[in-house]
Image (cartoon, rainbow, N blue to C red):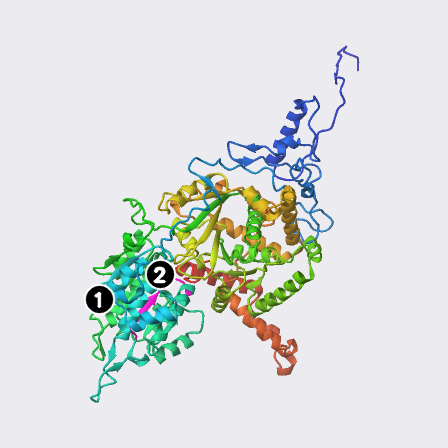
Amino acid sequence: MADDGLLVNFSIGDGIIKPEAKFKGGTWRDRLSAKKLARRRAQNPRPSKNGEQKSKNANNVPLGSQNKVDTEGGRPTKRQRTDSGEFRPAAASTTGERKQGGQQAPSSGSAGGGGHHRPKHVISSLFTSNPTPRTVGENEKLEGADEDVKVQPSNAPIEGMEDFTALGLTSTLAAHLLTKMELKAPTAIQKASIPQLIKDDSDAFIQAETGSGKTLAYLLPLVQRIMALKDSKIGEKGSAAKSINRDSGLFAIVLAPTRELCKQISVVLENLLRSAHWIVAGTVIGGEKKKSEKARLRKGLNILVATPGRLADHLDNTKVLDVSSVRWLVLDEGDRLMDMGFEEEIQGIVKKLDARQRPSSTVMGLPSKRITVLCSATLKLNVQRLGEISLKDAVHIKADPADVPEKPKETNEDRSNTFVPAQLKQSYVVTAAKLRLVTLTALMKRTFARKGSVMKAIIFVSCADSVDFHFEVFRRQISQEGEKESEEESDSEKKHEKTSQKNNADISKTSQHDTIAPAAVISNPSNQVTVHKLHGSLPQHVRTSTLASFARCKNAAVLICTDVASRGLDLPNVDLVVEYDPAFSADDHLHRIGRTARLGRDGRAIIFLLPGCEEGYVEVLKRGYRDGGKTLTRSDANEVLKRGFGGNIESASQNWEAKATEWQLDVERWALENPKILELARRAYQSHIRAYATHVAAERSMFNIKELHLGHLAKAFALRDRPSKINVPGLRQSKDETKKDFKASRKSTGKSSSSKKRSAADDGSDDDDRPRPSNADEAARKMRAKMMELAAGGASEFNLA
């Protein structure tokens, strides 16, 4: 072919052609964004102050860009994946103390990598890319500003009264309160309610703040009036009427929302009835065989403490339960009864009591009609609805403002609200999602640093899986560095530590479901701490024994629990309440912190909040204060970490960031090496996110699930997986399944496996021809049963998981 004379000129310039970097992993959108970003940086490099380009990490990304935070969205920029196929941590600290953050994840025990491939884990730095909290406002004070100011308790007994005889109680009962129960004077709500309930037969609504003695406010009049009853059946042959006994009938019923509260009311009632041993009280709360409860009812009771669901069941199916003589019905914690969905049960109980009530001439002194007492800390709409169902012409009983030392400045808006005790010191700490676990650990380390300063603490979390995870974190064995440091201690401290470990081992053996253990992470040689866990998925006998062990514990102890322990429980010597996860409503928050500062005692409470929209919850906290929240203080997260990991010495507090980072990485490695712990952490992470979305509608703007940084939150659960890869199939075991597994394990230990095997040739039949349920069928059957349970009534009354 002839040459047409066309000349083509290619100009490649003076530079060297460099191949473009290949980006792997992630979605195509992520790869395209990373490719565009790399081209833009190659075309327009950013010179530093000295004219040289910024140093780059292994991913070819400038270190300065990794620490940037998008101020508009409040979320840090994401790191892209490059040729190596794995993520690298963010920039190390300028001090060089956090170089261990770049360690590679071990290949063993990880879910993301199998065989010879490296696991694709995110080992992010702990103190970088964190959103900054808001600055302290003019009306916000840092913790420790006014610690010397003493506040007079608002729920303490009245100083001017010497005993209970002035309220109309008999001298026998008043003497028993003084000598046996060590109660010298009544509280303000007891002074207002006891005379009213003794003299008048009308219904009553008792409203008082938590920790003010509402239980004795209705039990004392009830016991005194039953003590005054006379049974005429005993005196039919001309003799005078005698005191009642267990065969005289059932006169009073007390309903409470949870089993733990029923147990506590029963204990207070038993102590009170030691002055009148002929009156018999009992409980029907579930958690045991109905045959045992029926036998208890068959023997005869005068006062019954029950949960609504179990009482409604016995009213329908137990013929020996005779309620014709019931003249007192007490509904304790009315707001919680309605929140848990007991409206239909209570309505049915009231109708059956009305239908079966008949005038009785066998007992002298019974009221002509039933008296209903409703107790609640708040006067919400659901409590008003409960009052319409159960009360008729009720008297509203509140504490006299003259008897309350700290008088609230009441307005029309807060007449239905309750207030926190005046002596309760409450603070909040704003900490990033990645720092939540280390901040909680530092707080507990600092709390129990000195022996005797704090005896007991309660940590509230949102779900049962989170309780199990944090229980395992606190009980895990100390690291090798901690063991080396303990070797340098004196012989006396070693002996003290060995004896305390033996005692803690004996305690842990008594817990059948492993709910009590020594807290090695937050303990020190001079102060050994015991950790307990409690949630609604545990069997009832385990819940009862765990709560009793925590109440009787004479040494330092921590209880990690859900809201199952937030209502009405009077646990002795609780000095600190930590709301690690904020409550689902403001009312639940008031009941949580009400576990401390009870009956005039001092107490502290602290709540964890995330930077951003959650900081608006501070205004909700201020509404519960009589002074408008002026005493609410703010704790600095960095100071908490310094005191927990660095101590008070300035030289030792300089490397607190390195110690906190090393502790966090140690927990993450521990989770990777243990498959059960890793699954528990993933399950807790998922359950926490689900629970986060269940806040009440009025507060959902402050707890917006769309504002959560899921990657940072995963680090608080010791996870290195990407949030999209964290998935645990199936549901957690219910309390019934846990109980069955426990019984099956006990039976299997006593039987040999050979006794269970049977040859088909022995009886001439072929076992393979028999229809057997497969694992898939059994799983489907359990899932259908679970869905039927949820469709029938939602969550059960005892499982607050």
Residue type pointed to by label 1: Lys
Q: Which residue is mark 1?
A: 199
Q: Position of residue 500 (x, y in %)?
A: 61, 64
> Is the residue 663 above or below the residue 517 in the image?
above
The tally of labels here is 2
Q: Is residue 257 magenta?
A: yes
Q: Secondary structure at mark 2?
A: loop
* Rendered residue at 33%/71% (across/down): 175
Using the numbered discs, state the Cα–Cα distance from disc 2 to disc 1 in whole angstroms. 20 Å
Q: Which is more toward the observer, 366 or 273? A: 273
Q: Which is more toward the observer, 798 or 607? A: 607
Quadrant the N terminus occupies: top right
Q: Which residue is mark 2?
A: 213
Q: Position of residue 598 (x, y in %)?
A: 40, 57
Q: Secondary structure at mark 1?
A: helix
Instruction: Determine the image quadrant of residue 697.
Output: top left
Residue type pointed to by label 2: Gly
Instruction: Determine the image quadrant of residue 474.
Output: bottom right
Answer whether residue 694 is visible to the viewer in this image: no
User: Are the two marked residues, 2 and 1, in contact with CB atoms closer than 8 angstroms?
Assistant: no
> Is the residue 553 above or below the residue 7 in the image?
below
Q: Position of residue 115 (x, y in %)?
A: 72, 51
* In the displayed structure image, the side of residue 460 where residue 746 appears, left or right: right
Answer whether residue 248 is visible to the viewer in this image: yes
